[in-house]
């Protein structure tokens, strides 16, 4: 606004501005009436958010989500210790079985070695007995022959068999 204008011009300018503002406000009001009502949709979204918050709260209370990585690591270690303990028990059982089988095999071998040694001793004893028997038999035959000869010489008999 300029100061050299008349009050009528100033009033006319003011009237035009007010009219312009009025049209603008009416346009805004008309636009606001033309927009759809989202209150029902927003209420549904709000209800779903509340349901999801309740579900998330219930999930947050579950033991799995309350575990820390350290607690999970400790559980894994306990489980692996249990599995290894069972494996160690089974391995010890297998080792005891193998030890028992080895002892049985060693005992069978020792028995077989002893039986073989006894058979060898029996064979050698038989051979020595036969040789000794032959020597004793030959010696006793020689002694008998010599005795018969000496007895025949003493008695004057001419032979071993004098009845002929």
Image: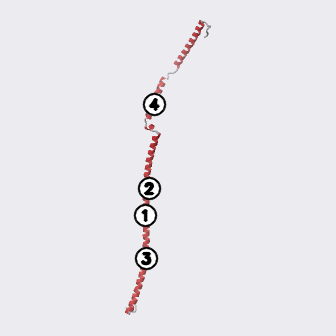
User: x and y percent of residue 55 in the render?
Assistant: 44, 32
Between the residue at mark 3 and the residue at mark 2, the CA separation in whole angstroms equals 48 Å
Q: What's the mark number on residue 108?
A: 1
Q: Which residue is rendered at x = 43% and y = 76% of the image?
A: 128
> Pointer 3: what residue?
128
Foreground mark, 2 or 1, reads: 2
Q: Does dot 2 land on a helix, a strand or a loop? A: helix
Q: Which residue is rendered at x = 42% and y = 67% of the image?
A: 114
Between the residue at mark 2 and the residue at mark 4, the CA separation in whole angstroms equals 58 Å
Q: Alpha-carbon neighbours of circle 4 within 10 Å: few (<14), some, or many (≥20)? A: few
- The answer to whether any part of residue 60 appears in the image is yes
State how many labels appear: 4
Badges 4 and 3: C-beta atoms under 8 Å apart?
Answer: no
Q: What's the mark number on residue 95?
A: 2
User: x and y percent of residue 42 in the render?
Assistant: 48, 25
Q: How is the image coloured?
A: secondary structure
Mark closest to the chain's N terminus, 1 or 3: 1
Mark closest to the chain's N terminus, 3 or 2: 2
Between the residue at mark 2 and the residue at mark 1, the CA separation in whole angstroms equals 20 Å
Between the residue at mark 4 and the residue at mark 3, the CA separation in whole angstroms equals 106 Å
| Quadrant position of the C terminus in the picture | bottom left
């Amino acid at each position: 606004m300029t100061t050299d204008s008349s009050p009528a011009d100033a009033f006319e300018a003011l009237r035009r501005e007010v009219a312009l503002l009025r049209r603008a406000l009416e346009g805004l009001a008309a636009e606001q009436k033309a927009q759809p009502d989202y209150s029902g949709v927003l209420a549904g979204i709000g209800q779903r958010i509340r349901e999801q918050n309740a579900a998330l709260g219930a999930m947050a209370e579950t033991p799995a989500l309350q575990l820390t990585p350290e607690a999970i690591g400790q559980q894994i270690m306990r489980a692996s210790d249990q599995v290894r303990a069972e494996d160690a028990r089974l391995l010890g059982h297998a080792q005891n079985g193998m030890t028992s089988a080895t002892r049985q095999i060693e005992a069978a071998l020792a028995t077989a070695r002893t039986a073989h040694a006894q058979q060898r001793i029996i064979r050698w004893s038989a051979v020595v007995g036969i040789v000794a028997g032959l020597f004793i038999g030959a010696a006793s035959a020689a002694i008998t022959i010599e005795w018969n000869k000496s007895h025949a010489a003493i008695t004057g008999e001419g032979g071993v068999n004098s009845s002929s």
